[in-house]
Image (cartoon, rainbow, N blue to C red):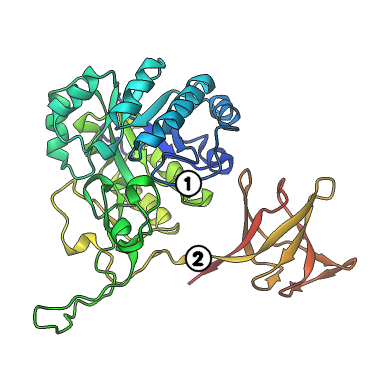
Amino acid sequence: MEKTQTYDKIPELVVGVRNLAALSVCRDHADAVYFSLDRFSLRARAQDITLTNLGAFVRHVRDCGLKSYMAVNTVIYPDDLPDVGNVIEAASGAGVDAVIAWDPAVITRTVDAGLRVHISTQANVSNPESADFYGSLGASRVVLSRELSLSQIRNIRENTHMELEVFVHGAMCQSISGRCYLSAYLRGRSGNCGDCTQPCRWQWTLHGENGEQVELGGKYLLSAKDLCMIEHIPELLEAGVDAFKVEGRLRNPGYTAAVSRCYRKALDACREGSYTPERALEWKERMELEFNRGFSTGFYFGVPGPEGLGYESDMNASPVQREAVGVVLKYFQKQDAADVRVLEQELAVGDRIIIEGNSTYIEQDVGSLMREGGSILKAEKGQEVGLAVDGKVRKNDRVFKVVFS
């Protein structure tokens, strides 16, 4: 393969995870992971990591050779302050490598605890003086606004010594830096407190001033496509950023595995001088098989127009879908098998399945099924069957069928 330009400085790859399963699949690709507790997070549905198991989780991260960054980035109200103190104390005791924050109360308490602070994109840092301001408060890194162009990022890099982190992949919010009030207004559930109902992903109808419906060729009028910068890694490296961030704390581990692997390959290729547009397209096509809303380059090359919106698709544009099948009842280590209750639909030999839980992620084909002491080819809805598994599974892990549309 013909050599291309090599890059000596390779940014840190920071991947969002929600539990041990997600950590396990990106451990060989990421340099650091970011996560959140069951409170003060913009991903309130990510409930797997708590004050009780935080220490154990951070030890797992450290054992993987990775850094751990914990997000504490919701709006903080007066009644929240005592619990914020508990969270920062727990983070310090667990030895997290940094706290991702933007509220001054959280920043102050984190600095006082002797922890590094990374300024959340919620702060909408969009110029070098803002970056330096947060540096004066004790922060070491800023996660830049997602609404910046590549040229603006270069300007910030040239005028500040702060570490700069940028989003390179994942969901995009309709509102500047995710500071959205639409969910709170429509449903009484605040996106700024992590409880967004995602009205931007709903079907909408546009009406003109005369009351007539306007035809726009689609119903999802506010749904932004996902960010994907895999084809522009060299431009980002030349801009001088220090870290790449992959969004996805609520995505399944299969997504986490594929995306982290592709960006690691891209960064390694840039280091080795083997990055090419053709390889980048292959990585992009691989990531299109995971959950996505279509891909765009966001604001990096200008304000996105209609090409940045997914008018015709609701939540998942991938041709690969996951359909619920059942739940694990028991695991038999000596037999490499599990009892599975088939709940939602039938399961057959040859099906491609995923077994997933807080600490479990396995992709495999169904090799054999057993029922009442004999082999069967298909398990019907409502039945309990023995399933040969390719690794350790746990009670209450969910079983999904992989379906190609």
Circle nearer the N terminus (2, 1):
1
Q: Name the residue furthest right.
A: 373
Q: Please state the horizontal and vertical placement of residue 371, each as a whole percent of the image.
A: 84, 68
Dot 1: within a 10 Å radius of its alpha carbon, few (fewer than 14), some, or many (20 or more) residues? many
Three-letter residue code for mark 2: Gln
| Left or right: 14 as drawn, with respect to 354 | left
Residue 333 appears in the picture as rendered: yes
Q: Mark 1 — residue? A: 256
Question: In the picture, residue 291 is in which quadrant?
Answer: bottom left
Residue 399 is labelled as none
Q: Mark 2 — residue? A: 321
Q: Which residue is depicted at the point 63% across and 46% down?
A: 360
Q: Which of 46 and 87 is in front in this view?
A: 87
Dot 2: within a 10 Å radius of its alpha carbon, few (fewer than 14), some, or many (20 or more) residues? some
Q: Please state the horizontal and vertical placement of residue 250, each as a whole percent of the image.
A: 46, 50
Residue 273 appears in the picture as rendered: no
Quick one: SS at disc 1? helix
Q: Please state the horizontal and vertical placement of residue 268, each as a whole percent of the image.
A: 39, 33
Quick one: SS at disc 2? strand
